[in-house]
Image: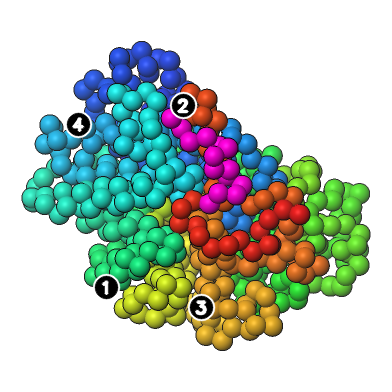
């Protein structure tokens, strides 16, 4: 694909620029009187810098990466929700001072330079960044944001900003639709390589994502808009058209996916989610439930550093050798082990952590299951069971931002939950969503330059069996089994699995639908999640740095993040979400 080839040539330069801007702010500020209005900017240089910035914020462990614990696709002690106003300062700062500053400069400079496509594509990316900000914080400056005339920009609530974002998308799409053959496009675009058709599909897909949120809030006109997009709206229509950011594989300059950086070292940042691994293993889950078949993506998502961790064997690792952590140990045989030590162990070497587990972190970096080849560019699990290091895998991972599988999951949601006529049934959308995502994941090692062992690759028959099992469960839910009790939950569980590489959308899904169900200790003693001590965050706390310097920011006390959802989050939260 064009954008992948361009990416290989642009990645080192753009990451280096990003590091210079973020680490040397004093020098950068000395260059111009107004950092928001640089002199004679090179628009081709600004494109990849902005793209690196907003993509990396989403997965970086000190930015928004921890939202994966809120979306329950991986875990850490953050699943106790011990956030403060300063927790997400860096994410907010880099969205505005690195991503949006550069995008606004492109938008401002493009008309005079006769670069209509550059400006329109920057507007679409600006819309994506602001939609993300509103979805997770609920309010932000918009009209006065990133404007040198407003040192302390006025904040606006999300319900006011959303229509403005949609109008910005329409403006950009109209500009792209009016281009003449031969009009210049951004050659440094690290995502689509300046492919206008793909950017138009990205813009329409972003509108679909936003209208899904609005439909959830009861906006009837949003359902009509979804129907128009579904029936000829020029959406992302294949994996090849995904709006995603691909990383490089070098350490100097550092261009690897952030999860490879922080997991292919001795001390690791996250734990893999016990509930997610157990769903994907398919052999057993909490309460003895079985999904019947193994997820074909299992060996691509997770790499086991141990494979012979068997508490019933003679040579077992015992509590004296491996400190206890986690709640609700589960394995193939019996109940005695659970009373000995509460390991976060799934059997066959899958060692993770339960959601809500606030216990300390032992010296288990060489034992816990870690990120595999998708999306982090790590290792494919071929049973080699080694302690991973920087040299393992390539780090050439991906951040999936808006994808073909998301389109189909959203259309299934619109059909299933909001009664939209999407041109196909919810079942057909679900089948295509699951199958296309599996295809994407299974093809990814070649993209990342990571080798696999064909012995352990799933066959097409195994893929078909898995997809057919999901559809059969969707068609005939089993109300006697909490994890398989409704078609909605089966759809949401598959959507959650597919969002392993996008913590923001995983968090959005769980807040929007309150699905999928994750069993907690009050429902099942042998559960894979416990109720955390604190309230589930309805949104992120407003950044403390912004509150300290901007008197026009909405005060935390006016809209407490623990109890005030974003405007489209209108459903009541079940008791399983909140603290004891």
| First along the sequence among labels 4 and 2 | 4
Residue 329 image offset from top left, x and y in percent? 81, 62
- Per the model, the C-alpha gap separating discs 3 and 4 is 49 Å
For label 1, the SS is: loop
- Per the model, the C-alpha gap separating discs 2 and 3 is 53 Å
Q: Identify the main secondary structure in magenta.
A: loop
- Per the model, the C-alpha gap separating discs 4 and 1 is 36 Å
| Residue beneath the point at 31% across and 28% down | 147
Q: Is residue 350 left or right of residue 107?
A: right
| First along the sequence among labels 2 and 3 | 3
For label 1, the residue is: 231
| First along the sequence among labels 4 and 1 | 4
The part of the chain drawn in magenta is: 551-565
Disc 3 and disc 1 in contact, CB within 8 angstroms: no
For label 3, the residue is: 467
| Residue beneath the point at 58% across and 32% down | 86
Viewer-nearest residue: 125 or 533: 533
For label 4, the residue is: 109
For label 4, the SS is: helix
Q: Is residue 32 left or right of residue 24?
A: left
Comparing labels 2 and 3, the label whose residue is closer to the camera: 2
Give the numbered dot on residue 106.
none
Task: Say how many tags the image has.
Answer: 4
Give the numbered dot on residue 551.
2
């Amino acid at each position: 694909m064009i954008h992948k080839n361009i990416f290989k040539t642009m990645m080192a330069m753009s990451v280096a620029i990003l590091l210079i801007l973020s680490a040397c702010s004093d020098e950068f500020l000395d260059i111009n009187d107004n950092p928001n209005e640089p002199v004679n900017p090179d628009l081709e240089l600004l494109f990849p810098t902005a793209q690196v910035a907003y993509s990396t914020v989403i997965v970086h462990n000190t930015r928004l990466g921890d939202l994966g614990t809120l979306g329950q696709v991986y875990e850490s002690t953050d699943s106790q929700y011990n956030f403060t106003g300063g927790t997400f300062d860096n994410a907010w700062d880099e969205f505005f001072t690195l991503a949006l500053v550069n995008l606004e400069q492109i938008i401002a400079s493009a008309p005079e330079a006769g670069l209509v496509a550059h400006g329109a594509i920057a507007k679409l990316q600006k819309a994506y960044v602001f939609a993300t900000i509103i979805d997770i914080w609920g309010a932000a400056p918009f009209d006065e944001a990133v404007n040198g005339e407003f040192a302390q920009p006025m904040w606006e609530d999300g319900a006011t900003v959303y229509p403005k974002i949609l109008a910005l998308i329409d403006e950009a799409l109209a500009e792209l639709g009016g281009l003449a053959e031969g009009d210049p496009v951004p050659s440094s675009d690290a995502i689509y390589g300046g492919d206008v058709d793909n950017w138009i599909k990205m813009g329409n897909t972003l509108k679909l994502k936003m209208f899904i949120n609005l439909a959830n809030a009861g906006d009837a006109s949003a359902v009509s808009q979804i129907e128009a997009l579904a029936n000829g709206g020029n959406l992302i229509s294949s994996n090849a058209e995904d709006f995603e950011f691909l990383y490089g594989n070098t350490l100097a300059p550092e261009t690897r996916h952030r999860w490879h950086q922080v997991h292919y070292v001795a001390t690791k940042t996250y734990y893999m989610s016990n509930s997610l691994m157990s769903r994907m293993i398919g052999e057993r889950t909490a309460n003895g439930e079985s999904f019947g078949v193994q997820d074909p993506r299992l060996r691509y998502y997770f790499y086991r550093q141990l494979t012979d961790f068997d508490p019933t064997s003679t040579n077992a690792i015992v509590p004296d050798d491996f400190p206890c952590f986690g709640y609700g140990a589960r394995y193939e045989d019996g109940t005695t082990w659970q009373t000995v030590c509460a390991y976060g162990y799934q059997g066959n070497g899958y060692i993770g952590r339960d959601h809500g587990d606030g216990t300390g972190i032992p010296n288990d970096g060489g034992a816990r299951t870690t990120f595999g080849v998708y999306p982090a560019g790590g290792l494919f699990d071929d049973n080699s069971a080694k302690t991973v290091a920087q040299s393992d895998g390539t780090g050439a991972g991906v951040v999936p931002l808006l994808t073909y599988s998301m389109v189909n999951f959203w259309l299934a949601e619109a059909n299933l939950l909001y009664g939209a006529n999407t041109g196909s049934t919810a079942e057909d959308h679900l089948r295509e969503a699951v199958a296309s995502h599996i295809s994407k994941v299974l093809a990814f090692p070649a993209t990342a330059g990571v080798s696999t062992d064909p012995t352990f690759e799933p066959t097409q028959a195994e893929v078909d069996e898995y997809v057919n099992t999901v559809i059969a469960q969707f068609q005939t839910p089993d109300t006697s089994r909490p994890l398989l009790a409704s078609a909605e939950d089966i759809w949401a569980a598959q959507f959650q699995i597919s969002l392993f590489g996008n913590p923001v959308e995983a968090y959005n899904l769980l807040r929007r639908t309150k699905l999928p169900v994750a069993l907690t200790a009050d429902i099942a003693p042998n559960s894979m999640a416990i109720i955390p001590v604190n309230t589930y965050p309805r949104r992120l706390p407003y950044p403390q740095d912004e509150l300290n310097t901007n008197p026009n920011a909405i005060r935390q006390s006016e809209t407490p993040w623990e109890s005030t959802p974003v405007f489209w989050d209108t459903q009541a939260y079940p008791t399983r979400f909140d603290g004891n």
